[in-house]
Amino acid sequence: MKSVTKAIIPVAGFGTRFLPQTKAMPKEMLPIVDKPTVQLIVEQFVKAGIRDVVLVTGWHKRAIEDHFDTHPELEALLRETGKDKLLSEIQSITNLANFIFVRQKGPRGNATPISNALSVIGDNEPYLVSWGDDILISDPPMAQQLIETYQKYNGIVLGSMKMVSPEDGKKYGFAVGPEVEEGVIEVTEIVEKPGEGKAPSTYATLAGFLFTPEINPYLRQVVQDIKGREPNYIDALSRLIHDKKKKVYAKQFSNAQYFDTGSKLGYLKAVVEFGAQHPEVGEEFTKYLKNR
């Protein structure tokens, strides 16, 4: 079984839910106190041993590439002014991983950027995927839980959170199948946003997944032949499950908090949560919230 050392983060979307702010700034660069959302996702990957991070971008996402690049002028200024802690912090961003940037080509839809990145990933090893606006903080880290489940069952692993509210059926896709252990099911079907009160299970699929090479041909297929709607990675998974090419599992993350920072409410919740825990302002910010 091969080690998991690569990850894909699609970040080419327009972020229309945050317009006009995202007209010039990528939504993935919106700050969670003092770090952009995409950096928090990268840090979670790195904690689990990921070394190569492929970011699938568009022409309007140059700020993301710049963020993970070096900044000689700023580094020189911080060095000259004795701000060694800040200097070390911004230098560490560049050294988090080996960053590879791929421009998205093809139709809209979340299968497209993953397919675009396969020329870098290759067809011989597993890899992680997470959307650029999904933050999941857990212990152990999200990526580590996915990798451990893959190592145990040697299959594709979908990240999941336990969702029981009737409204969740409008927001998420749900995995269905028999439970193989507490918090893990073998997936026989994925139902995308079934509707309020119609969720077929409590396994809402979100915030990261681990793919094995068996999914790659299906991703390429759906990008080429899905017509009339955006090609979705779930289309590829459904075909793979039907053909029984590889077993698929869903893992409910333990000790986890999930934030959809692509929505206004989810973003605000993330800012409040991270702000309350921030080492510099957390205590004062918490007092403010209580007083308010």
Image (cartoon, rainbow, N blue to C red):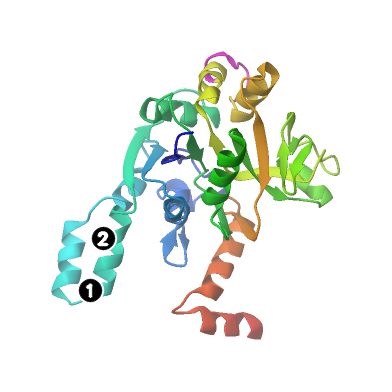
Which residues, given as a range, are shown in magenta? Answer: 223-230
Query: Which residue corresponds to mark 2?
Result: 91
Q: Quadrant of residue 120?
A: top left
The reply to whether residue 46 is in sight is yes
Residue 108: percent from left, percent from top: 52, 28
Mark 2 or 1, nearer chain start: 1
Amino acid identity at mark 1? Asp
CA separation in Å, label 2 and label 1: 10 Å
In the picture as drawn, the residue positioned furthest to the right comes out as 197
Q: Which of 18 and 109 lies nearest the eye of the viewer? A: 109
Local crowd at mark 1 within 10 Å, few (<14), some, or many (≥20)?
few
* Residue 225 is one of the magenta-drawn residues: yes
Kindly report the secondary structure that dominates the magenta region of the rendered protein: loop
Amino acid identity at mark 2? Gln
Residue 206: percent from left, percent from top: 63, 44
Query: Which residue corresponds to mark 1?
Result: 84
